[in-house]
Image (tube, rainbow, N blue to C red):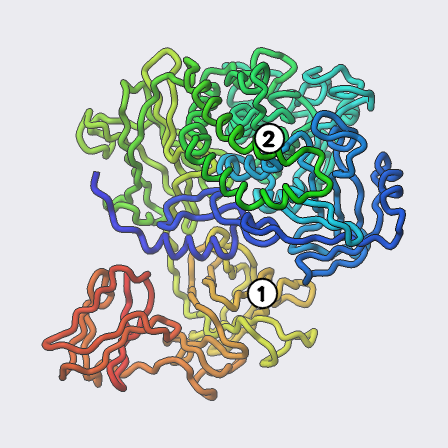
Amino acid sequence: MKKYIVALYGLLWAAHLQAQDLPAEYSFSADGYRLQKGVQSISGLYEEALIQDVYLDFAQSNYWSLLTANYSSETLLPATLTYNGTVVLDSVGVRFRGNTSYMGGPGGGGTSQKKSFAVATDFVFPDQTLLGYKNLKFNNAHQDPSFMREALYARMARRYMPIAKANFIHLYLNGQDWGLYPNVQAVDKTFLKEWYWSNDGARFRATVDGGGPGPGGGGGGWGDGTAGMNYLGADTTAYQQYYSLKSSDIDNPWQYLVDACYILSTATEDNKDSVAALIDIDKTLWMLACENIFTDDDSYVMKGKMDYVVYYEPETGKTAPIEYDGNSTFESNAATSSNWGPFKNANNVNYPLLNKLLNIQEWRQRYLAHYRTILNETFTTDNATALINGLDTQIKDLVAADPKKATTTTQYTANVPQLINFVTNRRNFLLSNSEVAQLSPTITFAEYYNSAGQPHTPPTAAESVTVRAEAGGTVLYKVWLYYAADLNGSFSKTEMFDDGLHNDEAANDGIFAAAIPPFNAATWVRYYIEALSDNAQHSATYLPTGAEHDVFVYQVAMQDAANGVVINEVMASNSNTASDEAGEYDDWIELYNNNDTEMNLGGYTLSDNAANPYKWYLPENTIIPAKGYLIIWADEDKSQGAQHASFKLSASGEQLAFYNIEGNRVDAVDFGAQEDDKGFARIPNGSGDFVIKSPTFNANNEEGGEVSALVLAPADEAAMLVFPNPARQVLYVKTPTAQQPLVLLNALGKTVWSGTTQMPYTAVDIAALPAGVYYVQCGAQVQKAVLR
C-alpha cells in the first residue's frame, strides 16, 4: 500500500500538545498520527540510568528503636534528606513500610536491618517535594536476590498499563551505608496526574482485613470474596473494612466503588454495555494480562485482594484496577507461578474481574489479543536479556558491597540468568496454550482520508472521514472501526466493509473502510481497528496493537472567522516591562480592534491548548474600543481581576489562539523561544507579520522600539522572486546575479539552509522542513515564504 507524506499539520499540533497539555505519560508519535502512553523516556527522580546517593539523617541517636516503635502506628520520624549531595530537604517524615517485607519470611527476616522505608517530604512543609514527588518508597527487595524485579517489571509493562516507575538509590542512615534500594514511585495523586487527565477521582487501596496473621489477614485468606471488587451489598460501610480511601476530590466516593462492584457482579453477555459504562474494560484487561504473564505473586490475579488499587475516573465515569506492588514478579517456582495458565482464577467466583470479564467471549478475545501483544513485543528473550544485562551492569557492584542485604551475592549472581531463563520458559509455556496459539488476523495498515480523498489531511467540521485498513491473514468474520471524540472517553464502533461500496477501493481486495461522522472544529478524534477471525472464538487483533491506550488520532481543522480583532502582541517573559493591578510582572496578551466600531468580546475565548479551545472565557460585556487595545494577563490568577486568564504563556514557545462565541478561530499565533522583556508583535500594527521587538504595551507597535527580526522588502521593489509561495517540496529563488550568499531563516531568525544563488534560479530543498513561515535573505533583500 502506498505510503504517504507525513501531515505537517498533525506534526506541529502534536509537538504543541505534547509539550504543553497532555498528562506526563501521554505522548504523540513522531509523525503526529498516534497518541500513546508509557513510551517516552523517564527523567528526574526515576531516571533509569541514575543511581543517586540518598542520606537520611535523624537528630536522635536511637532512631532505629523509634522507627521500630512507630511501625504499627505509622508515625513519622523527622529527618533531613540529602539527595545527590546537592538537594537538601529539611524535616521530612520517615517510617518503616511493608508487611511481609517488614515482618520477615524467606529471603528477608524480621531480624534483618534491610527494612523498606516510606518518606513524606511534606511532613512539615506542605509544598516541599523531591524533584516533584512528595511520597517516596525505598524498598528492600524482599524475596528478590536479584534486586531488579520491580524495576524490570516497570520497564517491561509500562507500555501497557499505568505502573509505578522504578530505579535505584544508594541509601545512608546517619552517615552509615545501608546499601542499594529499589526506588519505587508511590501510587498517589502525583502518579494519577501523570497517567490520567486529573487526580480528582476516588482512589482506593484494597487491604488485608481483620488484622489477623497469615495470608489475607483475619478475613479468610486470598480470594475470600471480600476485597476483589466483590459486591458486598448496597451499604457503603460494608466496604470500608476491606478498602482504604486514599484520596478523593469528589462527593460520595464510596458510592462509586459500590456501583462498580454491583455492575461487575451482574456482568453477562446480555448486559455488556451496562458493565462497560461503569468499568473500564480495556484498562482492566491489560492489567490482568500483565499480572498473569509476569506471574505477579502480589497481585489481583493471585490474591484477589490487597495488592492492587481501585480508581474511579470522574472524566469517564469508569472504575478500573491499577497495579500496585511488583516486587514478587518473575516467580520461578515451577509448582506455582511459572505454570500459571492465562486464565488463572478465571473460574473462581471470588475473583470477579477475572471470573466475570474473561468468561464473556468478546472480552476474553480482547484479553487474549492483548496477551499476545505483550508476548510478542515485550516478554521476549531478546528484550529481557538486554534489560536484565543492563540492570546487572548497573547494580552488581553495589549489590556485592551492600552491607545490609538479606540475601547473598552468590544468590544475586545465580538469579540474573535465572530471570532470563524464566522469561524464555514461561513464554514458551504460554505460547503452547491452545487459546493463546489460536490463529488471529493481521492488520497491516490504517489511514484516514478527508472528503476530498486526501490521506492524513484534517477534515473540516462539516466533513466525515473515511478510514481504510488492510486486514487478512485468515478468513475474517468482521472488521470494526472504533472511534471517539476528544482525547479521553469511551469509543463507539462501526463495521468496516470490503465490498467496493464504502470508499474501500475494490471489493474483496482486503481493503476495508468505514466512515467517522463529522465533529466540531478543533476536536481531536481517536480511532483504532479490530479484526476478528471467522472461527468459533472470533480471535481478535488490533491496530495499533496497544489499543485503547495507543490509538490513531487526527484533529478537525480550525474554522477561521476573522472579525477585525486580532492578537497584536504577546510577551511570554515579562521581567520589568509592565505590571498588573497587583504590581506583578506577568505574561500578557494584547488584542487590537481593527474595526471602526467597538466590539463586545464577552464569551470569546483564549487558549494555549488546541484540544481545549474554551480554556478561558473573556468575561461578559468585555468591550474593546474601535481601533483600541485590550490587555489580558496570562498568569493563572483569576482572583486578581476579570482580565486574568487561567493559563500562562511559555517562554520556550507555543501557540495561542483566539475564538469567537461559536468556537470558530478568529486569530492565532505560533511563537518560538522568546527573549526577556521583548514583545512578539505585529508590524504593521494590527495586520502584519509578527516580529521580536521592543515592547509597545497597550500601544501601536510601530510607534517605538527597535525591531529585532527581519524587515521585508515590498514585493514590487524586491530584487528577487520567491516561488511557489506557499511551497511544499522545493522553493525556487530567482535573483539578478549568481554566486551571492543566500540563506533561508525560520520565524525565529535561525538559519535552516544556506548556499549561493544560481542562474536562472536557485532550487532550495524544503521537504524535510516543518510547515510555517520562513524568510529568504539575499544581501539586504528579504522575502517571506510559507512552507506547507
Answer with left or right where residue 549 lies relative to residue 540: right
Q: Which mark is residue 781?
A: none
Task: Rate crowding at label 2 as few (under 14), some (14 to 19) or many (20 or more) other CA atoms within 10 Å.
Answer: many
Quadrant location of the C terminus? bottom left
Percent position of residue 9, x then y: 34, 55
- Nearer to us in this view, 370 or 104: 104
Percent position of residue 267, x then y: 57, 17
The three-letter amino acid code for the residue at tag 1 is: Asn
Q: Name the residue at the left extreme.
A: 760
The residue under the point 34% across, 25% down is 531
The residue identified by callout 1 is: 621
The residue under the point 54% across, 14% down is 268
Percent position of residue 320, x then y: 59, 30
The residue identified by callout 2 is: 320
Question: Which element is circle 1 on?
Answer: loop
In this rendering, the answer to whether 18 lies above or below 411 is: below
- Nearer to us in this view, 741 or 505: 741
Total tally of numbered discs in the picture: 2
**Alpha-carbon span between mark 1 and mark 2:** 44 Å
- Nearer to us in this view, 637 or 366: 366
Answer with left or right where residue 279 lies relative to residue 374: right
- Nearer to us in this view, 135 or 100: 100
Answer yes or no: is residue 114 visible. yes
Q: Which is more N-terminal, label 2 or label 1?
A: 2
Question: Which element is circle 2 on?
Answer: strand
* Mark toward the viewer: 1 or 2: 2
Percent position of residue 424, x then y: 45, 26
The residue under the point 45% across, 22% down is 368
The three-letter amino acid code for the residue at tag 2 is: Ala
Residue 247 position by quadrant: top right
Answer yes or no: is residue 184 visible. no
Quadrant location of the N terminus? top left
